[in-house]
């Protein structure tokens, strides 16, 4: 995982919009792109039994979205979710459940006062390293 990832400005706007649309639940989804540039968001339903504090993408959704990404000629470059409450840093759950070491984990804060409402992390073996976001 490189130390920086590029993401289209329109996708950043879309993630913030989704995070703010339902501030009581975590939103989540996949990010597709090519050559290190994220060009599209693929929203998923949050299937977690505790959607206010965690997220889960149902396997059927995951397979469908992965297929959509492939069909569009893109690769999975990231996975995003929001933290409606608290800081947009990986939670213990996020660290334990991160299973894609090559994907950037984006965490969005819907708060207007968040210093950095969109952050990205690379997670390996339960340890997160922040990835710089380059808006494109
Ligand atoms: Zn989280």
Image (cartoon, helix red, strand yellow):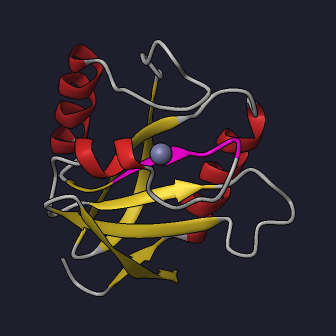
Q: In this view, does 121 lie above or below 130?
A: above
Question: Where is residue 9 drawn, in percent x and y?
Answer: 60, 70
**Range drawn in magenta:** 79-85
Residue drawn at 17 percent across, 39 percent down: 71
x, y percentage for residue 104?
31, 64
Q: Closer to the camera, 64 or 60?
A: 60
As for residue 86 lying within the magenta part, the answer is: no
Instruction: Say above or below: 62 vs 35.
Output: above
The x and y percentages for residue 130 are 39, 78
Place of residue 108 in the rendered image (x, y in percent of width and height, measured from the top left): 60, 55
**Residue, x 73% and y 27% (percent of image)?**
24
The quadrant in which residue 88 appears is bottom right
- The foreground one among 65 and 80 is 80
Res 60 → quadrant: top left
Q: Is residue 29 left or right of residue 126?
A: right
Residue at 45 percent across and 50 percent down: it is 91
Q: In this view, does 24 lie to the left or right of 90?
A: right
Whether 38 is drawn above or below 19: the answer is below
The residue under the point 58% across, 45% down is: 82
Give above or below for 48 relative to 74. above
Toward the front, the furthest residue is 92
């Amino acid at each position: 995982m490189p130390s920086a990832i590029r993401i289209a400005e329109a996708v950043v706007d879309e993630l913030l919009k989704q995070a703010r649309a339902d501030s009581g639940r975590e939103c989540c989804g996949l990010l597709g792109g090519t050559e290190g540039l994220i060009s599209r968001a693929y929203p998923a339903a949050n299937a977690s039994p505790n959607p206010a504090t965690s997220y889960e993408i149902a396997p059927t959704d995951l397979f469908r979205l992965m297929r959509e990404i492939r069909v569009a000629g893109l690769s999975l470059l990231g996975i995003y979710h929001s933290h409606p409450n608290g800081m947009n840093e990986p939670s213990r759950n996020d660290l334990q459940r991160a299973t894609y070491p090559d994907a950037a984990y984006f965490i969005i804060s819907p708060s207007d006062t968040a210093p950095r409402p969109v952050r990205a992390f690379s997670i390996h073996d339960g340890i997160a390293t922040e990835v710089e976001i380059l808006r494109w």
